[in-house]
Image (cartoon, helix red, strand yellow):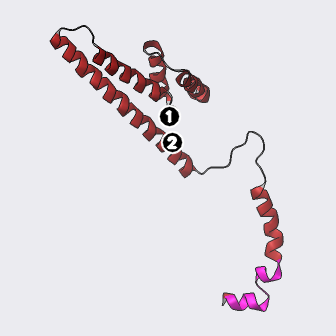
Amino acid sequence: MADAAYNSGSHPRATGKCNENSSAFIAALLAPLPEGEEPAASKTWLRRLDTDARIMWQMGMEEVEHARAHCIVDDERLRRLKILRDSASFAVLGAWNAAIDRQCCIPAPGIMALRWKRRQLRFSKLSDAALAQIAADEARMAAKVAA
């Protein structure tokens, strides 16, 4: 049935009317966005991005907790041996600090994550990349923090 309409010349593609209307539409789609404007995103897409960010944050927190657990076990080993510190314990502590630094380089998905990062500023020596990410998170969430 559709082929018959196309072959008879009454189909929009056969008459060329579709091309006139679609050329403006396609030109608008392909035109660059104005400065500072982002492409439109659906609620589903934004929710998926938020979920992915939370998953990445949680995976990083698991790594931090794993490194913390190693540090606690190592402290117990040192306590039983009555040793203050040895080179292995400094390596374990360094791994924990490195995990914290890597976690601070992940964008914070929410206010609680940003607060966790701020607490780490007091207790850990963070890299410049981590400090820059914390500043970017604070700028991004300034409206949420103020509310």
Q: Quadrant of the C terminus?
A: top right
- Residue 9 covered by magenta stretch: yes
> Residue at the location (45% across, 18% down)?
120
* Residue 64, percent from left and from top: 37, 28
- Residue 144 covered by magenta stretch: no
**Inter-mark Cα distance, 1 to 2:** 7 Å
Say above or below: 10 vs 117: below
> Residue at the location (66% across, 90% down)?
1
Kind of residue indicated by mark 1: Pro
Residue 58 seen in the figure: yes
* Residue 25, percent from left and from top: 78, 63
71 left or right, relative to 143: left
Q: What's the magenta region?
A: 3-16
* Residue 129, percent from left and from top: 55, 25
Magenta stretch prevailing secondary structure: helix
Q: Residues within 10 Å of mark 1 (few under 14, many from 20)?
A: many
> Residue at the location (76% across, 57% down)?
30
> Residue at the location (82% across, 63% down)?
24
Mark 1: secondary structure: loop
Q: Which residue is mark 1?
A: 109
Q: Residue furthest left?
A: 80
Q: In the rendered structure, are the residues bearing label 1 and label 2 in contact, judged by CB atoms less than 8 Å apart?
A: yes
Q: Which mark is residue 39?
A: none
Kind of residue indicated by mark 2: Asp
Q: Which residue is mark 2?
A: 50
Q: Quadrant of residue 34?
A: top right
Say above or below: 22 vs 135: below
Relative depth, front residue between 3 and 79: 79
